[in-house]
Each structure stands twice: as C-alpha cells, then as structure tokens.
Image (cartoon, helix red, strand yellow):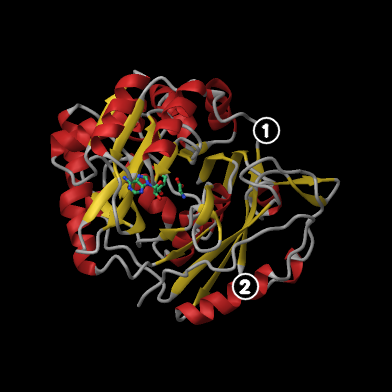
Amino acid sequence: MNILVVGSGGREHAIAGTLLRSPNVQQVFCAPGNGGTATMANCRNLDLAVDDFPAIAQAVQEYDISLVVVGPEVPLALGITDYLQANNVLVFGPVKAGAQIEASKSWAKDLMAEAGIPTAKSATFTDAEAAKAYIKQEGAPIVVKADSLAAGKGVIVAMNLESAIAAVDDLFNQGFNTLVIEDFLVGEEASVLALTDGQTIIPLLPAQDHKRIGEGDTGKNTGGMGAYAPAPLVTPEIMQRIQTEVLQPTIDAFNKRGIDYRGILYAGLIITPQGEPKVIEFNCRFGDPETQAVLPLLETPLEQLMLACAQQKLAEQPPLAWKPGIAICVVASSGGYPDAYEKGKAITGIESIREAMIFHAGTKLENSQLLTNGGRVLGITAIGDDFESAIAKVYSAVSAITFEGLYYRRDIGHRFKQ
Ligand code: AMP
Ligand code: GLY
C-alpha cells in the first residue's frame, strides 16, 4: 500500500521511516516533507501545503494512497480529517471537533472537569483585569496559558506575582483573547502517546521530553530538545492509573460529546511525588521529538496499527511488540533558536554515522547539498541495551555532525532514574 504523511518535521520523518519498515508499505509520500524524506528510499516529497486540503485529496487519488497520516496539529484543528473523510479517504488523526482537545485549553479543561480527570485547578478569562485579580487571589507560583494554539510559546510558568501579571498583559497584547490560568503542579513530566480508534485506547511506551533550550531545564521553552523512551518514571502501576484515570475517561468523554476520535491522544503529564498522574495538556497528535525516541523501538508494523485505528478495529490487535533497550533522541538546532536564527548553513558529517538514526526536521536539499532550514534541524536517535550505552552512542553520533551555529543540549536524560 501507499501512505501519505502530512507534515515536514522530525516526527514525520520518523513516522515515514517506521511505516517503510513494513513489507506491506510500498511507497510513502510526504506533504511537504523535508531533506530527510526527500532522500529516503521509497519516499517522495510532494510540494503541497499542509492546509491545502483539495490538493491533498487530489494527491490521494493520483498516487493511489490507502491511508493519510496527519503529523501536525494545525491541519487537524482546521479539519483536514473531516475534509478527507467526506471524500472517502481513510485518515489517521482526529476530526476537528476532537482536535479541540489541543486547540483550546479551556475546552480541554472543561472536558477534564466533566470526566473527573486529574489536572490542575484552573479558571478561564477573556478580561485582563479579572485575570489579574484571580492571580492575586491565588498567589504564585501560577501558570498563565493562551487558550489557543501558540506553537509552544503560549505558556508562562510564573514563579512570582509580577511575572504572572506581566504574562497576562503580554499574551493579550500578542492578540490572544482567552487565557487559562492554573495552579502550578510539582513533579516530573512525562509524555504518554496513545493509539485510539475512538473506543479502545492503547498507550505507547512512555517518554520524557526536554522542553527548555538550556541545560538543567533552563531558559526558554522550545518544541523539544530531546527525548528518551521508555521513561522508568512511569512505572507499570502509574501507567495503569494513566489508562484508567486519564486515557479511557477522555475517550468516554469524547463519545459522550458525539466525537469519534481516531489517531493519537497525547497526554502531557506531571507525575507528582506521590506517584499521581495529573494532566498538564493534551495534544491531538504524535509528540516531537518523543516520536523519534518511541517509534524506533516499535516492532509491530505501524501501518497495521494506524489502519486499525482508522477502521475502528484496534480491539482486535495483539499486544504491541517492542524492542528491548532504551532509545534516546538528541535534537541539533540552529544557533539562536527558539529566537531568531539563520538558515541555509551546509550540514556535514551525517554519512559517516552508523550507530544512530538521523531524523531530519528543518533541512532542505539544494543542488544535492543538505542545508539547515529551520530551528530544530536534526534529531539523532540511538538505541542502547541500557541508558549509558544509548547515551554514549547518541552523543558520539551528534559529535560527528557539523553546521555553522549548531547547538544541542549535552544533558538529555539527566532526569533518568532507574
Ligand atoms: P504546555 O504547553 O501546556 O505543555 O506547557 C508547556 C510547559 O509548561 C510544560 O511542559 C510544563 O513544563 C509547564 N507547565 C504547564 N502547565 C503547568 C502546570 N500546571 N504546572 C507546572 N508546570 C506547567
Ligand atoms: N514535544 C512536545 C510536543 O510535541 O508538543
């Protein structure tokens, strides 16, 4: 079968590569893809925008595509799945109504309250003065969030009242018209991505992301600077609680609202010191870079699982099969990211790497030369029998890569505890 992957990040490169490991998948198309998907065997980029639904539907016909897999949240929130389903196309990714779980934090909070899902206490505001009064009443630390999609830049964790109040003005001045303000949760973060067909929900291996740009989790938030899986922080007992207290109740709440949610449900969690999982956010898609750590360990053919989700047959699937060991992904970014950075720098050293997988994100191929083309440029993933061997392999691979301004965190996995 042929599959179309929508998106252009490291996540989409990892999805495309994993799909191509299955003998049932002949060809993967990426719309628009990147320098990595352009050079992978049996993979071809289509120069289509992720929100050009008619052109994507046409490509489905032209290239005999059996399944469309949607990577990023923006086309999902705009209704790509609804559009393609109306054209009788099988899609892995939720309908627009389901994508609200990521596209509106207040909508997600309402759903969690209704379903009794553990999360921080919160309130929603459209008025700056009311928001500030609430902050003064609650005290710091406190978290101020833009309600709508903000490409990872809409959350301010304020450790004092002044910065919380400044965050309110800042977000309203940026044009956001609704804010969610919530209690600060103490604990360790984990990402649990789960496959669902709208009835059955099956978690993938738990992962831990590294959202901040600086070592020791300092500095600005980014899309994610590295990840590893499985994260031992999420013990089997905690995973069981996540299944019964978070994942299944969310699917039940979707059904209660008449939403048929098929694809990935991503729970961003805080695990409290008492071992309780609490939701900090939901996403309606695979995480980036968590996917680049999780999928390399998956042995069950990915297209089989995605088809089962799209066709509502997930309950018939045998248990997921995983490779043993641990996978670690380190992101190599352009100097300056997540603020302004330069593009078009020549990337060298990739060809010599044998012990790690390279997932392209912000790259492009120009006259056979690979160039940087984004903030997060490459994700480098290595698998080891244990944490130490995976770390040694991944950093040895990263040190072979060069481009002007290359930056990466040297402490990915610093919170790993066996
Ligand atoms: P989000 O986009 O909602 O995942 O928030 C971005 C980051 O802000 C998260 O990964 C956390 O590190 C932090 N964060 C968000 N909400 C909270 C909270 N209620 N308590 C503590 N940290 C939070
Ligand atoms: N790595 C965080 C995200 O995908 O939203």
| Mark 1 residue element | loop
Viewer-proximal residue among 359 and 415:
415
**Residue on which disc 1 sits:** 47
For the residues marked 2 and 1, what is the alpha-carbon distance in whole angstroms?
Answer: 33 Å
Disc 2 or disc 1, which is closer to the eye? 2
- The amino acid type of the residue labelled 1 equals Asp
Q: Is residue 228 left or right of residue 417?
A: right
Q: Is residue 28 left or right of residue 116?
A: right
Q: How many marks?
A: 2
Q: Which mark is residue 395?
A: 2
Up-down relation of residue 251 to residue 86 (above or below):
below
Viewer-proximal residue among 157 and 360:
157
Up-down relation of residue 386 to residue 36 (above or below):
below
- The amino acid type of the residue labelled 2 equals Tyr
Residue found at x 54% / y 26%: 51
Measured as percent of width and height from the top left, residue 271 is found at 27, 59
| Mark 2 residue element | helix
Residue found at x 59% / y 63%: 409
Looking at the image, can residue 84 be seen?
Answer: no
Q: Residue furthest right?
A: 367
Task: Tell me if label 2 and label 1 are in contact, CB under 8 Å.
Answer: no
Residue found at x 30% / y 59%: 187
Viewer-proximal residue among 306 and 153:
153
| Quadrant position of the C terminus in the picture | bottom left
Viewer-proximal residue among 387 and 118:
118
| Quadrant in which residue 129 is drawn | top left
Up-down relation of residue 147 to residue 417 (above or below):
above
